[in-house]
């Protein structure tokens, strides 16, 4: 079977504003992970507050530091 290769969609986004604290936390966690101290991050919040954008920025940061990035999602089944 052929190996699957992640090919990110090209996106043109504006600069991320007002998330310096969150980005600093993610960066610190990536630094720790690169030294063998892994963790799990849970990102929660109301609709429209920028969760997806923060995740995309985190993915770019992680990939730029040489981490392998795997992406998945799950559907909400609540009403």
Image (cartoon, helix red, strand yellow):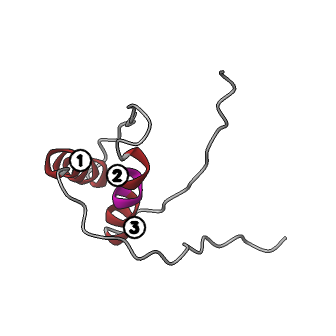
According to the picture, the residue beneath numbered tag 3 turns out to be 63
Q: Which residues are magenta?
A: 54-58
Disc 2 or disc 1, which is closer to the eye? 2
Mark 1 is surrounded, within 10 Å at the Cα level, by few (under 14), some (14 to 19) or many (20 or more) other residues, namely few
Q: Position of residue 28 (x, y in %)?
A: 19, 48
Q: Quadrant of residue 47?
A: top left
Q: CA distance from mark 3 to mark 1?
A: 15 Å
Front residue of 8/63: it is 8
Q: Residue furthest right?
A: 1
Front residue of 66/46: it is 46
Q: Quadrant of residue 46?
A: top left
Q: Position of residue 10 (x, y in %)?
A: 50, 78
Label at residue 32: 1
- Above-or-below relation of 12 to 34: below
Pick whichever of labels 2 and 3 is earlier in the sequence: 2
Q: Position of residue 40 (x, y in %)?
A: 39, 36
- Above-or-below relation of 76 to 23: above
Q: CA distance from mark 2 to mark 1?
A: 19 Å
Q: Quadrant of residue 39?
A: top left
Pick whichever of labels 2 and 1 is earlier in the sequence: 1
SS majority, magenta: helix
- Above-or-below relation of 11 to 38: below
Residue at disc 3, secondary structure: helix
Q: CA distance from mark 2 to mark 3?
A: 14 Å
Residue drawn at (26%, 51%), measured in percent from left and top? 35
Is 3 colored magenta in this rendering?
no
According to the picture, the residue beneath numbered tag 2 turns out to be 54
Image quarter of the N terminus: bottom right
Residue drawn at (41%, 42%), measured in percent from left and top? 48
Is the C-beta separation of discs 2 and 1 under 8 Å? no
Q: Position of residue 36 (x, y in %)?
A: 31, 47
């Amino acid at each position: 079977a052929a190996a699957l290769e992640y090919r990110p969609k090209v996106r043109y986004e504006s600069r991320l504003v007002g998330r310096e604290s969150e980005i600093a936390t993610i960066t610190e966690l990536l630094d720790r992970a690169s030294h063998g101290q892994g963790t799990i991050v849970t990102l929660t919040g109301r609709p429209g507050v920028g969760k997806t954008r923060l995740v995309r920025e985190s993915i770019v940061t992680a990939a730029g530091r040489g981490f392998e990035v795997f992406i998945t999602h799950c559907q909400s089944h609540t009403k």
